[in-house]
Structures are given as structure tokens and as C-alpha cells.
Amino acid sequence: MGLSISVGLLYDQARNDAEGLDGHRRAFARLGQALMAEGISWHEPEITGPPPAHTFSGGFPYGYLTQLRRILVLTNLGEPVTPALAVSERQYDLDCEKIREEMSMLTSHLLCHSDHAGYYVPVDFDDPLFLPDEAKVEGAGMVGSSQRLLAELSGIASSMGLATDGPFETERIAWYQLYRACLASIAGGHAVVFH
């Protein structure tokens, strides 16, 4: 089982799952209302015809997200960046502790997001949002900015040698999927949806 990522989710739901379409419309409405309460104006574009070019559907195993987060943390700390599959289990556990420590700073859009649900919206805001429980926004109310996630991903690309061959296979898969999703989100105005 893994993480599914969609941009333009309502188009897919309209074609394949009418019941799911209504549920996602309600979820997007709750998200829009909760964002408005935070002073952010955004709503998921409504379906107006065939899907535009700026949609995306992808995904990867949940563990890949943690491995990508590890790269971000090691890069930010100025530590050597190695592929997760090339380190000992003990070292990987130590690196995961660093992820938790960096996450507690509440500033990274990649780190401060649910692993399996939630949204990145195409609005540029500094820190991730932590919406109140009563807003009932998927992903425990953590909402990121597609623009800020894209900037974080761009900032770690060279750490993985994305321009050259290298051993960062799992991290690259996660990076590439998220990067493409952010580009589609920003271009089309749709949320990146983890589900």
C-alpha cells in the first residue's frame, strides 16, 4: 500500500466515482472555509469540462516520503547526504530522529504534513498551516503551500544528484512525483491531494 497523490482530483472523481465526487467537493469546501478563516483566499476549481493539461496522478510507497524527508533534513543540517538504502538501520533511525527534531520547528512544508492525507494549495505562504480540529480538514489540519514545497524540493535536487546517475532511487521517485504535482497545482490552481 502506498501514498496516492492527485492534482485535479474532481475531474477523476466525476468520471469514475460520483459518490466520491460529492465527498471530495464537501472536503474542498471545508478546506476553503478553514483557509478563509486564516486570511487565505483559495478554492478548488470546479469541473467545467474535460480535464485540463494541468492535472496529475501518481504515488509511491509511504516509506519513500520518509526517505525524501531525510534528504531534506540532512541537506538543511549540512550533513553528508547518502541514500537511505545505503545506511545501517541504526543510522537510519538516528536520521529519523533528526526528522522529528526538524519537524518540531514547524517551518518545512515537506516535513509538516500528514504522510497519508491532506493538501498543498497553490498559494504562497511562509509556514505550514495547522488548522483547528473543528475545521475537519483531512491530514490532521496540516496544509502546505505548493509553491513552498516546490522550493524545498528544488533546494534538495542537487543533494541527490538529480542531474546525474546515482543511487538515490527511492528518494528520486518521491521527489519527482511531488515536483510534478506541485507544477500541475501551481499551473492549474488545484490542490495537491494526499489520499
Image (cartoon, rainbow, N blue to C red):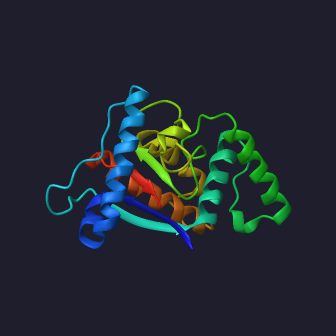
Residue 168, visible in the rendered structure: no
Spot occupied by residue 22 in the image (x, y as percentages of width and height):
31, 59
Residue 54 visible, this orientation: yes
When the figure is inspected, residue 42 is found, relative to residue 179, above or below; the finding is above
- Percent across and percent down for residue 169 are 58, 68
Q: Is residue 70 above or below residue 134?
A: below
Quadrant in the picture for residue 75: top right
Q: Quadrant of the N terminus?
A: bottom right
Quarter where residue 54 is shown: bottom left
- Looking at the image, the residue that sits furthest to the top is 39
Residue 127 lies left or right of residue 85; in this view the side is: left
Q: Give the x, y percent position of residue 19.
A: 32, 66
Q: Residue 162: x and y, percent?
A: 52, 58
In the displayed image of the protein, which residue is found farthest to the right? Answer: 90
Q: Which sits in the foreground, 33 or 119?
A: 33
Q: Residue at x 52, y 36 (%)?
A: 131
Residue visible at 66% across and 40% down? 76
Q: Is residue 175 above or below residue 19?
A: above
Q: Does 177 sit left or right of 9 as displayed?
A: right
Question: Residue sitting at 63 percent across and 35 percent down?
Answer: 106
Total marks placed: 0
Q: Nearer the viewer, residue 71 or 15?
A: 15
